[in-house]
Image (spheres, helix red, strand yellow):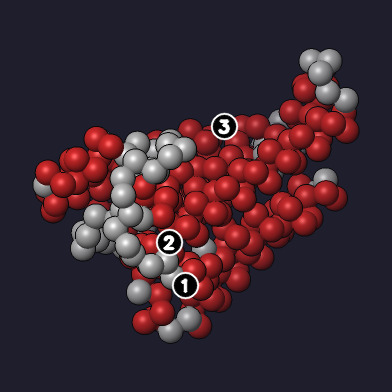
Amino acid sequence: MGATRFEYRFRYALHALVFLLGFSFYLLPSARESTWLVLTPLLEHTGWFSFSTATVSLLVLAIIFASTGAFLRTWGTAFLGAGVVQSGSMHGDAIHADGPFRHSRNPLYLGTFLHALALALLMSPYGALFTIVVISIFQLRLILAEEPFLAARFGQPYLDYCKRVPRLLPSLAPRIAASGAHPRWLQAVLGEIYMIGVALSFAIFGWRYNANLLIQCVLVSLGVSFLVRAILPRKQQD
């Protein structure tokens, strides 16, 4: 079942709400430790990791998730345009067959899911589980709302595109020829400044092994993204 118009229009706010609820599980008396801190001794007990190696391994995994998510979203936004990505309505001006859309039909949603996995390590285990499950369902609902819209708009060419390009998990090699669109990288970086900020936060400050510090960095990245969207001329977002 696809997302409703309300869900699609306010999808960014709903994502933020899910993340906020995920972090709010820290309010439970039995959920005061981060998933990062809980998983570290579990990995140590397998005998394959020392405590320090387990800690570093989880951090590296979070950096990979956050960085890959930010890259996919920025790459996709460079070809779609920040205005289209951030719009509250669906757009069907053309079938995008460039950049990451040659490998996956939904690189932006995949990027958001990887971002959620990185944030989940900063949440309590209950919050992490809640966030991953809800974000997964919501992403799928958004995809199932877009696909009938695009199929109705473009017909057989879009159905052919769907047959060749995976819905979510990307293929290593491009499945279709490029259409020749030119990426707008500056616009994409500004449009995805939050994702980029979170990835940089993990890469730079994660080595302090302080989940609270990283949560503060996430909030700062969110604030910067609001500021950029407020001061950026509207025509540069479209």
Number of other residues with Cα within 10 Å of mark 2, as a class: few under 14, some 14 to 19, many 20 or more:
many
Q: Earlier in the sequence, mark 3 or mark 1?
A: 3
What residue appears at the point 81 percent right and 35 percent down from the top-left corner? Answer: 55
Secondary structure of the residue carrying numbered label 3: helix
Q: Earlier in the sequence, mark 1 or mark 2?
A: 2
Q: Quadrant of the C terminus?
A: bottom left
Q: Are marks 1 and 2 in contact (CB under 8 Å)?
A: yes
In the rendered image, which residue does mark 1 sit on? 187
Q: Say if residue 94 shows up in the picture.
A: yes
Q: What is the CA distance from the residue labelled 3 to the residue labelled 1? A: 33 Å
Q: Is residue 124 above or below residue 91?
A: above
83 and 26: which is toward the camera:
83
Give left or right: position of 172 versus 222: left
Residue 37 x, y percent position in the rendering: 78, 34
* Residue 128 on image: x %, y %: 60, 36
Q: Position of residue 56 (x, y in %)?
A: 81, 38
Label 2 or label 3, whichever lies nearer to me, is 2
Q: Height in image: 153 above or below 137? A: below
Residue 160 at x, y percent in the picture: 19, 40
Q: Which mark is residue 129?
A: 3
Residue 90 seen in this snapshot: no
Question: Disc number at residue 119?
Answer: none
* Label placed on residue 77: 2
Q: Amino acid at mark 1?
A: Gln
In this rendering, the count of numbered labels is 3
Between marks 3 and 1 in the image, the one whose residue lies nearer the viewer: 1
Amino acid at dot 3: Leu
SS label for mark 1:
helix
| Local SS, label 2 | helix
- The residue located at (28%, 37%) in the rendering is 164
Viewport quadrant of the N terminus? top left
> Is label 2 in contact with label 3 (beta carbons under 8 Å)?
no
